[in-house]
Image (cartoon, grey):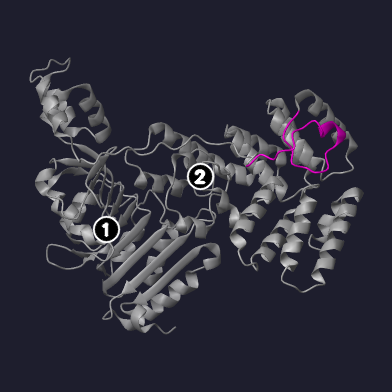
Amino acid sequence: MIISKEFYDKCGASYQKVIDELEKKIAEIEKYDDATKGKKLILTIYHFSKRHLLPGEYWEHCLCRNMKLYNPDKLRRKIIKHAYYHLYLNKKWSSRFYWGSNYPKLDFFRSHFQWQQLNTIYERDLYYPHDQLKLCLRKFGQETTKPPSKNLYKRCEEMMALYPKIQAAIGDIDEWFQLLLKVNDDKYLKDNVEYRIGHNLHDVKLWKLYINHLKQNGHFKYLLGIYSKYCRFFLDDDDMKKEYQKAMLEYGPVHLPWKNLFEFEKGCDMEEIEHQYFIPDEKEDDAQSSEDLFDKSICRRFYVTYKAFQEFALPGPIILYVLENAGHQVLRKLFASCKWFFKKQPTPICYGLRTGPREIYEGESLTLKEYSKKQSFAKNFYITGNMFCKMLDHAVLIDFLPKFYRCEAKFICLPSVNLSFNELKSLIGHGGVVELDIYCCKLEDEKNEDVALEKILAFLPNIEILYLPNVKMTKETPHALTSMKFNSKFEGINIDLISGVPFDAEEFLKFLIINKINEPYQFFNCEFTFRKEFNADFVQMFKKLMKDYSTPDEYCTVDVHVDGWWDVGEED
């Protein structure tokens, strides 16, 4: 039997009878060993699903058989679609629904593999509680061409605070359901309730909570579809069937795909609607961009109407003081209120500065080509969001460093760049960097020496992801690090070509333990690569210590290597 005995024993007598018939047909098919056996089995289960609600184990069985067929992808999509109609969705293949405007809003966002393969985060992904909300917000901040709104940040904070409460209440159906209601998102409630029902069809209490909610909130057409599913699993529940009949007479007809319609359902249109149980989201607006980096006529018109003399309610020195010390949010408002402010302090605000195949200004983000000319661009850029540079284009952004008025970027990715420590401080000195990637670059201080790790981290109190090269470890490093206060937790640290002297490894491990992320299902990954000339005995001891600490099953890994390990391998 494909379903468990425990599940079977909980079923009503009538449902057990139809399951027995299905299992008998499956057993007959399994007796034969021919090329069509897989398709016959899937077809048999599919025909059953047109008359009765089907437990998830049968859909999983279909998918296993489908993998052995010649062209499984198309059939796999159909199986998943029908499984979802039967309220069943497996986390491993839920990514099937995430592409396009219709997708489930579940409290889990992606599997780890799906997250690693993810290319784009949409604003819609940030409005409901899920296990990857913090990471999604960070990735969205990296990808967007303008600053996320205050309302978006506020919504994310509310949802991040609500998520652990929802998880903690899973054992109490009533409390869990009430917390879902606090999200104030009908689709989120529907998707999570149906996901949970699909993994426990016998949860009568949740079925009825859900039905009452749909009824009280006027989702009558949807209610009829849920009634139809309930009555095709609990075949002996005559009271619910009468309740369903009354609702059908009052709110029907509704589209139903079942082949065994009840008498009171037969007035319904039999045509099945694609994605019946998805609610379409609004379409994403296509990014509007211009082929030209700047429209010079705009600049000419700006100065034609500019008035050199302005009268303000505050004295001139105060106005100038405010202007010179304002952050980018205040500057935006000042620039929008009067052209005089920009004339006095021409600091174009740039949320994102990156390299790409063409020169373009989109939103508040500037993209440069590898061979962009310096004279083509305005001076005194105020970088507020992110800096991303491809490996082959590193000269572009570094050439423009002298043109920066201020850098307050949260996300900085400058691989293969040669930076002095002073140049790095000009980029990270504001203290707000969340992700810093200068991997494969050459970082040196004024004496052309490697920079001690603690000197770099002193400027990174909010860091979460860190990729560094050419870092020096001293005897003081671990104790200096444990004495620092970080506002965020580390999710990843990757340090390459570590030089220096042996240090207190236990104290360094203490630093990692104190500051690593501890949220459920959140990964913490570290990788340390020492130079060949570093003390070999110490490296082996450090490697063993980190290996003993690593717990891959609990999403924590710390790897230690020696330079060149990818060429010659390493012995344990």
Q: Position of residue 489 (x, y in %)?
A: 42, 53
Q: Position of residue 513 (x, y in %)?
A: 44, 61
Q: Position of residue 441 (x, y in %)?
A: 23, 64
Name which quarter of the figure residue 147 lies in: top left
In the shown orientation, is residue 257 left or right of residue 292?
Answer: right
Q: Secondary structure at mark 2?
A: loop
Tell me what residue is drawn at x 60 percent, y 64 percent.
71
- In the rendered structure, which disc, 1 or 2, sits on the residue that comes first in sequence? 2
Disc 1 crowd, CA 10 A, few/some/many (<14, 14-19, 20+): some
Q: Quadrant of the N terminus?
A: bottom right
Please report the bounds of the magenta region as a residue range.
Answer: 253-274
Viewer-closest of 89 and 504: 89
Q: Amino acid at mark 1?
A: Lys
Q: Main secondary structure of the magenta part?
A: loop
- Marks 1, 2: nearer the viewer: 2
Whether 64 is drawn above or below 335: the answer is: below
Residue 507 in view of the camera: no
User: Residue 100 has which mark?
Assistant: 2
Q: Position of residue 154 (x, y in %)?
A: 44, 34
Name which quarter of the figure residue 153 lies in: top left
Residue 45 in view of the camera: yes
Whether 563 is drawn above or below 233: the answer is: below
Viewer-closest of 346 and 267: 267
Q: Secondary structure at mark 1?
A: loop
In the shown orientation, is residue 462 left or right of residue 196?
Answer: left
Inspect the magenta stretch and tell me whether residue 254 lies in it.
yes
Q: Are marks 1 and 2 in contact (CB under 8 Å)?
A: no
Inspect the magenta stretch and tell me whether residue 196 lies in it.
no
Name which quarter of the figure residue 23 lies in: bottom right
Disc 2 crowd, CA 10 A, few/some/many (<14, 14-19, 20+): few
User: Residue 390 has which mark?
Assistant: 1
